[in-house]
Image (cartoon, helix red, strand yellow):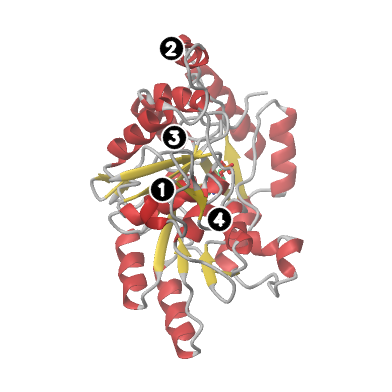
Amino acid sequence: MIPYGRQNITAGDVKAVSAVLGSDWITQGPAIEQFERAVADYCGAEYAVAVSNGTAALHLAALALDLGPGDQLWTSPITFLASANCALYCGAKVDFVDVDPATITMDPVALDQKLAEAANHNELPAIIIPVHFAGQSCNMETIKALADQYDVRVMEDACQALGGSYRMSKIGDCRHSDAAIFSFHPVKSITTGEGGMVVTNDKKMCERVKRLRSHGVTRSEELMQEKTHGPWYYEQVELGFNYRLTDIQAALGKSQLDRLDSFVSRRAELAARYSRAFSDLPVTPLTQAADQQSAWHLYVIQIDLASVSLSRREIFEALRIAGIGVNVHHIPVHLQPFYSAFGFAPGDFPHAENYYKRAITLPLYKDLTDAQQDEVIATVKATLS
Ligand SMILES: *Cc1c(COP(=O)(O)O)cnc(C)c1O
């Protein structure tokens, strides 16, 4: 089976991990700080805080922006569950903004309308999480301008988009947001096994996320209620978690980061090959906005079901049987039975639902060879003809 995604691990990665294993620190030592600095510098942001996974990063960033009971968080329905679940962890409510049918990222027009309506009912969200779906940046300039107009915080869910860029600067520079969130799960741009990061230009946010990832504990006296008991003293100033990344993982991440640009350029090359090969087929790739360069996390085709005789499920199963590890990203979050308990129902976000009915994700990763991709292309063509 040719999988839809796969990590690239080299002897250099193994060496970097081994070096940490033989060192004095295997968690929360110098490799964490080096990885954080390297990601912040890569993105052009001031600060980065490494945590145990992307979901933890979303949770802590939302907490650091003071999300809590009585608040709302809005995100895209086409995302991984975590972009919405992070609001529930904080006791807040979730709502969604439908996607643009061309790019399948948050539609600024829908956002504008929803914000105006919410303002009328005094129900504005505290946080908006635009999701850079498949590696493509949302229209951040417009989204941030709208958020500013209504005094709403913005967290970019950039879990799929490390290495991509928007208007000539890297995704994660937080020029149009309070924070950006990355994941280092094995199918993402670079991996640490499990891992995540909050990137921000706000020093307070950085410090708060650092504190929250280690039980809400501080060693700085100006934050303490009690006078220090001595050099050992630390104080818990709020409720935090153990969401730490290990130095073992950070060493892998730093070593991977050195190859990020080559990963993204190979993915872009493969994506262009797919798009050329499918130009005559009844399929539509995601439209690429001219002012961004995708990190190409996913290559998605949307099948024109009216002009083929098979259902999406039949096409999907035929491809799997032929050894192509296709997938579907994502089931709209509001259609999850768990979310229907909050009042969501089919028909709520029609662009997202229409997309979901006809989407299939094809294999796309650094080490996919031209020959393997040709096999995928030939199988897709044969299945659709
Ligand atoms: C992968 C992903 C996450 C979650 O990241 P984990 O590291 O798996 O917790 C969140 N949002 C999006 C859009 C993702 O793709």
**3D distance between C-alphas at marks 1 and 2:** 29 Å
Which residue is more in the foreground, 294 or 149?
149
Q: Earlier in the sequence, mark 1 or mark 3?
A: 1
Nearest to the eye among marks 1 and 3: give it. Answer: 1
Q: Earlier in the sequence, mark 1 or mark 2?
A: 2
Kindly indicate the quadrant of the structure image that contains residue 48: top left
Residue beneath label 3, please? 271
Whether residues under marks 2 and 3 lie with C-beta atoms below 8 angstroms apart, the answer is no
Q: Earlier in the sequence, mark 2 or mark 4?
A: 2
Cβ of mark 3 under 8 A from ligand 1: no
Q: Amino acid at mark 4?
A: Ser
Nearest to the eye among marks 4 and 3: give it. Answer: 4
**3D distance between C-alphas at marks 1 and 3:** 13 Å
Residue at (58, 57) in percent of width and height: 86
Residue 136 in picture, x, y percent from top left: 41, 48
310 on left or right of 123: right
Residue at (66, 31) in percent of width and height: 325
**3D distance between C-alphas at marks 2 and 3:** 27 Å
**3D distance between C-alphas at marks 4 and 1:** 16 Å
Residue beneath label 1, please? 136
Q: Amino acid at mark 1?
A: Gln
**3D distance between C-alphas at marks 4 and 3:** 26 Å
Nearest to the eye among marks 1 and 2: give it. Answer: 2
Q: Is residue 357 above or below residue 244?
A: below
Kindly indicate the quadrant of the structure image that contains residue 83: bottom right
Few, some or many C-alpha atoms within 10 Å of disc 2 (few <14, some 14-19, many ≥20)? few
Which residue is more in the foreground, 118 or 357?
118
Residue beneath label 4, please? 83
Nearest to the eye among marks 2 and 3: give it. Answer: 2
Residue beneath label 2, please? 12
Residue 376 in picture, x, y percent from top left: 58, 28
Residue at (72, 49) in percent of width and height: 311
